[in-house]
Image: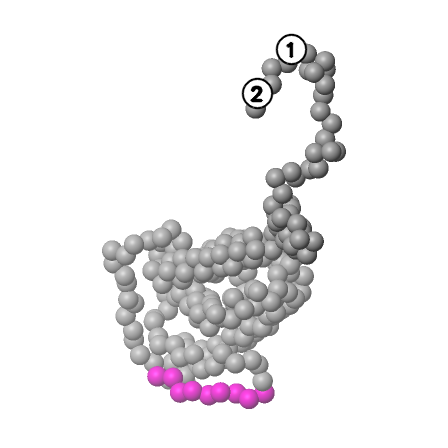
Amino acid sequence: VSDVKNYKKFVPFCTKSIILSQGPHELRANLEVGFPPIIENYTSVVSLAKPKLVQAVCRDGKLFSFMETTWKFNPGLKSNPQSAIIDFYIDFEFKSLFYSQVSALFFDQLVQQMEKAFIQEAQRRFVLPAVNRRLVSTSKKSNDTAVADAIKTETKKVEHKNWVNYGFDTKSKDADRTALHSIMFASVTLCLVVGGYYITYLPDYNLRDWSQREAFLELRRREKLGLPLVDPNLIDPAKVTLPSDEELGDTEIII
């Protein structure tokens, strides 16, 4: 979890991770997360208390008012000294109400996907046995602690064979489908909802609405005065000055 510089290699939707400064108990990193067209670049301050705590705080993002992630590690089952209890907490607030509503639809799925990515990376690095995981709670931090009994069981990794890849993740079918659905949802929402809203309230550059309103007002005026609604003489003939025969000369007139 503290290997921030390699986040871009295994953390979902993380495309860049650069260490700006690093000390024994704290580091600053620049991260870029998201998928087009929603991409966030921010600086995160990471506090390290090995081997129990990794906490990252961001308050300078363009999309987020703030974002805080906390990983806590405690000893696991007494019968298995290689096991651990992991508490993962994330709290954030979008500056945009639209992004807040969209994120609420994918919050639980995103948390589980991040948890899965870190555990798979730990298994790859340290060759750990696969164990069952139980999600105890996704509620906000509080003084209350939820406790659940965990039973160590060997599990087999389910591999999807001959599945159609959409180009987002070549190794995981679930991650590939999740990215596809997220991008399609964002694209449809932006194109249809935002695009339709823009077209509906587009300014009347051609004065079509103004012309139609003026025409109705003119019809009402002529109706009150007892005049024909449509006059063949749009302009009073007395006000029209025509050229004389001498001015016209040999000019051919076609009617």
Which amino acid, by three-letter code, is at mark 2? Ile
**Marks 2/1: CA–CA distance:** 13 Å
Q: In this figure, which residue is indicated by the disc labeled 2?
A: 254
Main secondary structure found in the magenta portion: loop
Seen at 37% across and 60% down, the residue is: 177
Q: Is residue 241 left or right of residue 162?
A: right
Can you tell which quarter of the image residue 235 is in?
A: top right
CB atoms of marks 2 and 1 within 8 Å: no
Local crowd size for mark 2, using a 10 Å CA cut-off: few (<14), some (14–19), many (≥20): few
The residue nearer to you, when weighing 97 against 131, is 97
- Horizontal placement of 189 versus 161: left or right? right
Q: Which residue is mark 1?
A: 250
Instruction: Report which quarter residue 31 is drawn in.
Output: bottom right
Is-magenta flag for residue 166?
no
- Residue 226 % position (x, y): 66, 53
Residue sitting at x 37%, y 69%: 128
